């Protein structure tokens, strides 16, 4: 009788472990990026005079925010053809080989390789940024801006601001003579959703 009871306990524990494992996977905080409520902006100096802003309009991917920051991840893709500088002629130039070469390099991507606990409840994220066919590892600070649980599912927001030198990604047009600066500020604000 004791052996039988012990056997039942073992089966119960095994079943509980399997269920817990499935629950842990199901509770993973993975969010699909909502491109309609996300923004990617860039800022560059024009003629050493004033900062100029532009944006990309097509953003996709996913990110996960876990209780253990090291298990969090980010995978973001941006269509270079969606660049928007509020001027169609200039947009055409920005899509040309002088700048993003959208035909040859249709996407900008960022994929995290390491995530750590950051300051003020945020995350310190290291990942590979691919732009213009060049991939470089960068580290950025990511702020978790908010979350919401509604009838249509859960949403979470994040934001980051960081600087890159465009010449390091093979985009040097306009540097000579100072027409356009080399330092580019990138501002990324993402809203992601998951079915609740």
Image (cartoon, grey):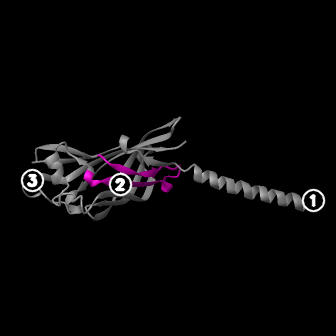
Is 45 placed left or right of 38 in the picture? left
Magenta segment, which residues? 57-81
Residue located farthest toward the right when viewing the structure as drawn: 1
Callout 3–callout 2 Cβ contact below 8 Å = no
Q: Quadrant of the N terminus?
A: bottom right
Question: Is 63 included in the stretch rendered in magenta?
Answer: yes
For disc 3, the marked residue is 178
Whether residue 45 appears in this view of the structure is: no
Q: Quadrant of the C terminus?
A: top right
Could you say which is closer to the camera, residue 132 or residue 124? Answer: 132
Image point (9%, 53%), residue name: 178
Is 83 placed left or right of 160 in the picture? left
Q: CA distance from mark 3 to mark 1?
A: 87 Å
Image point (20%, 53%), residue name: 183
Whether residue 151 appears in this view of the structure is: yes
Label 3: state its secondary structure.
Answer: helix
Up the image or down, 86 lies above or below 73; here it is above
Residue located farthest toward the left when viewing the structure as drawn: 177
Image point (32%, 53%), residue name: 78
How many other residues sit within 10 Å of disc 3, few (<14), some (14-19) or many (≥20)?
some
Label 2: state its secondary structure.
Answer: strand
For disc 1, the marked residue is 1
Disc assigned to residue 183 = none
* Among the 4 quarters of the image, the one containing residue 164: bottom left
Residue 92 is situated, as x and y percent measured from the top left of the image, at 17, 52
Residue 162 is situated, as x and y percent measured from the top left of the image, at 29, 50
Q: CA distance from mark 3 to mark 2?
A: 30 Å
Is 67 placed left or right of 160 in the picture? right
For disc 2, the marked residue is 77
Residue 34 is situated, as x and y percent measured from the top left of the image, at 40, 44
């Amino acid at each position: 009788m004791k052996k039988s009871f012990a056997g039942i306990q073992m089966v119960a524990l095994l079943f509980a472990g399997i269920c817990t494992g499935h629950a842990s996977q199901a509770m993973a905080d993975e969010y699909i990026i909502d491109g309609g409520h996300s923004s990617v902006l860039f800022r560059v100096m024009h003629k050493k005079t004033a900062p100029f802003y532009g944006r990309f309009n097509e953003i996709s991917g996913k990110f996960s925010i876990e209780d253990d920051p090291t298990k969090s991840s980010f995978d973001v893709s941006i269509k270079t053809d969606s660049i928007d500088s509020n001027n169609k002629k200039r947009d055409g130039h920005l899509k040309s080989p002088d700048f993003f070469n959208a035909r040859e390099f249709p996407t900008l991507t960022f994929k995290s390789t390491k995530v750590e606990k950051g300051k003020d409840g945020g995350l310190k994220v290291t990942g590979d940024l691919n732009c213009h066919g060049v991939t470089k590892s960068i580290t950025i600070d990511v702020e978790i801006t908010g979350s919401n649980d509604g009838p249509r599912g859960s949403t979470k927001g994040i934001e980051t601001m960081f600087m890159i030198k465009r010449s390091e990604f093979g985009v040097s047009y306009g540097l000579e003579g100072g027409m356009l600066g080399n330092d580019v500020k990138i501002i990324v604000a993402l809203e992601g959703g998951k079915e609740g």
